[in-house]
Image: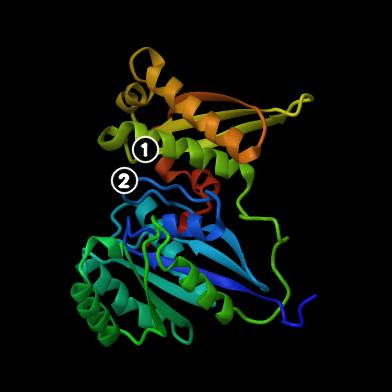
């Protein structure tokens, strides 16, 4: 037994859409708990992933990307992101090395001082393999002149560069106290939501630009079978009849391909057989239904502002 005290706390990962927050979360946790695609703004709920580092338990909150909201769903997502900052012990702002200080990053910096007051804030410059060293140095100096970061890290979330150093530093900054989750638990999302997120990711990867933003996936039923397998029934909600055709594809081929890819990943994640059944339904006003927001872990009222 070690004499070191146990530590546990929350780390909020914030940044613009597509900054690499979900990729970093999955690398830190060592498993896929957050949707990762090349389409911006895919993380909707604040997804918690749990990482262990020595005697420290780090609970990562992967917030939706911070951007200028236009619709109710956008406003609820941005409110969730800033809520994650307010709840965290440590905040990590992620920016992309090759994009530098964008207008969106400046807007985040302007609000960060107010929302993260009294909290430790670190800077993680991601995708460092895309720029030269002198550009990184200049970017680091400019960012630290704009905000008093406690520490700056150069990382590649995709390739793993610098991620261990960041994790060890975060572990040292966690407050002393008992662990918040069992040692072998990697996420506090219900399995039903993880399953829905996996299917939504496969839809995003399959449809690319065609994918309607007014789309969500819900796990309607989960049945444990006597042979150890699971039957999972999911509904893909779209806002218009035309979107239903896109999601189904010719002869239902898109839904079949998405279902197969999601089932295979679910089987790997759960370590057992899965029978996955998808339905596509048109629900024109789902973006205005409080129940849909609850399913995504968002607050419907936050979309009013």
Q: Residues within 10 Å of mark 1 (few under 14, many from 20)?
A: many
Q: Please state which of residues 62 and 153 is positioned toward the viewer in this rendering.
A: 153
Where is residue 251? Give x, y as percent.
37, 12
Q: Report which residue position mark 1 lands on.
A: 204
Q: Is residue 282 above or below residue 8?
A: above
Q: Quadrant of the N terminus?
A: bottom right
Q: Secondary structure at mark 1?
A: helix
Residue placed at 54% from the left, 77% from the top?
89
Determine which quarter of the picture holds residue 159: bottom left
Measure the alpha-carbon separation of dots 1 and 2. 7 Å
Q: Is residue 175 above or below residue 226?
A: below
Q: Across the whole image, how many numbered discs are drawn on residues?
A: 2
Where is residue 38? Give x, y as percent.
32, 46
Q: Report which residue position mark 2 lands on.
A: 39
Q: Quadrant of the C terminus?
A: bottom left
Q: Please state which of residues 281 and 263 is positioned toward the viewer in this rendering.
A: 263
7 displayed left or right of 144: right
Q: Please state which of residues 165 and 198 is positioned toward the viewer in this rendering.
A: 165
Marks 1 and 2 in Cβ contact (< 8 Å): yes
Determine which quarter of the picture holds residue 94: bottom left
Q: Secondary structure at mark 2?
A: loop
Residue placed at 66% from the left, 36% from the top?
271
292 displayed left or right of 99: right
Who comes first in sequence, dot 1 or dot 2?
2
Residue 261 appears anywhere in the view: yes
């Amino acid at each position: 037994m070690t004499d070191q005290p146990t530590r546990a706390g929350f780390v909020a990962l914030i940044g613009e859409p597509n900054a690499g927050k979900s990729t970093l979360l999955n690398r830190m946790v060592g498993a896929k708990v957050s949707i990762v695609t090349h389409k911006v703004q895919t993380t909707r709920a604040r997804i918690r992933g749990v990482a262990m580092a020595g005697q420290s338990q780090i609970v990562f909150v992967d917030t939706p990307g911070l951007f200028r909201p236009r619709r109710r769903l956008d406003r609820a997502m941005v409110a969730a992101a800033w809520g994650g900052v307010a709840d965290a012990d440590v905040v990590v702002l992620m920016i992309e090395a090759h994009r530098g200080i964008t207008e969106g990053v400046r807007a985040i910096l302007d609000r960060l001082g107010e929302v993260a007051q009294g909290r430790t804030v670190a800077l993680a410059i991601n995708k460092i393999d895309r720029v030269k060293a002198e550009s990184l140095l200049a970017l680091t100096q400019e960012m630290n002149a704009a905000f008093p970061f406690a520490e700056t890290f150069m990382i590649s979330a995709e390739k793993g560069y610098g991620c261990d150093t960041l994790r060890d530093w975060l572990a040292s900054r966690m407050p002393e106290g008992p662990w918040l989750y069992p040692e072998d638990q990697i996420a506090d999302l219900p399995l039903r939501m993880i399953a829905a997120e996996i299917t939504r990711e496969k839809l995003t990867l399959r449809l690319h630009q065609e994918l309607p933003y007014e789309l969500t996936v819900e796990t309607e039923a989960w049945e444990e079978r006597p042979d150890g397998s699971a039957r999972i029934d999911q509904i893909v909600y779209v806002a218009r009849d035309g979107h239903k055709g896109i999601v189904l594809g010719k002869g239902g081929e898109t839904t079949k391909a998405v279902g197969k890819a999601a089932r295979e990943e679910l089987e790997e994640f759960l370590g057992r057989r899965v029978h996955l059944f998808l339905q596509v339904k048109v629900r024109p006003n789902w973006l205005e239904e409080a129940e849909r927001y609850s399913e995504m872990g968002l607050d419907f009222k936050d979309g009013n502002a």
